[in-house]
Image (cartoon, helix red, strand yellow):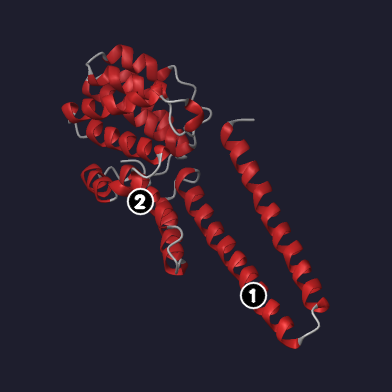
Amino acid sequence: MNKNTTKYLLLFVKQYYIWAVIAIFSLYLISVIMKTPSISGKFFFLIMGSSIIIGGIYYEYLKKIYQKMIIAQTQRLDLALAKQYQEQLEKLDFFHGFKGSIILFDTLCLIDQQNYLNCLQHLKKNEAFFKAKLDYLFIFYYHQLLCYYFLDQTTNARVIMAKLKQFKTINQKKLSPLFSFEQIDGIEYLLNNRNQKGLATLEAIDTHHFNPREKILHYQIMLKVAKQKQETKRIINYQKTIQNLTGGEKNETIK
């Protein structure tokens, strides 16, 4: 069982666990109301308990939309559908509880659309959010690295690479397994014009735990250098892998 399968299995179990908690709380609320002697007391518990239950159900509904949005983006590679879910989520999220998740989602979208300059602006605009947590800071630097790499801004990419490498000295238990340090090492070789070493490092990475979107991005990193060096065999192999991942269909993720 790979990491993605495990993640979605845990998500499935957690989802039904939460509904079970809501059901138990509802039964408890009914019991409290029935045992409360005064009408005013019954009314108080009814209003308070109902508010909690409705709030919980509404949050779970929004979370379901969010999950569909992420699956559309990372598994189905349907950015248009993911954007539809995003619009629906933002419209219904009155208290902006998913604001941070939307910031992260928009970051991935800009990368998928190969809109690297706007992605850098987006990261800068939301820098305070990304620096609030260690995991988010890693995401911040990683996507800056990707933008500079694809924009051929090697000097800037090396500056960010130095910041990313500092995360290796941090206790890995404090970090979510968000990205592959081996991939980052491979990109560093490419930035230093050690292209064969970089491509060999990237090709050796086991991508089975990557989701489809991450796999495509991984091969795009290699494809960029293969095209620059006119390595026909690698270009064909990388493009074929990307086409297989997308089912041979064109979408906004691949350009």
- Labelled pair 1, 2 in contact (Cβ < 8 Å): no
Residue lying farthest to the bottom in this orientation: 39
For the residues carrying marks 1 and 2, which lies nearer the camera in this image?
1
The N terminus lies in quadrant: top right
Name the residue at 60% across, 43% down: 8
Q: Is residue 231 something that shows in the picture?
A: no
Name the residue at 30% across, 12% down: 196
Q: Quadrant of residue 238?
A: top left
Residue tagged by mark 1?
A: 48
Residue 137 horizontal/vertical position (percent):
35, 38
Name the residue at 70% across, 83% down: 43
Q: Is residue 36 above or below residue 239?
A: below
Mark 2 belongs to which amino acid? Answer: Asp
- Earlier sequence position, callout 1 versus callout 2: 1
Observer-nearest of 35 and 82: 35
Q: Quadrant of residue 192?
A: top left
Q: Quadrant of residue 50?
A: bottom right
Residue tagged by mark 2?
A: 106
Residue 152 horizontal/vertical position (percent):
19, 30
Between the residue at mark 1 and the residue at mark 2, the CA separation in whole angstroms equals 36 Å
Could you classify mark 1 by the number of other residues whose Cα lies within 10 Å: few (under 14), some (14-19), or many (20 or more)?
Answer: few
Residue 254 horizontal/vertical position (percent):
35, 41
Mark 1 belongs to which amino acid? Answer: Met
Q: Is residue 177 above or below residue 52?
A: above
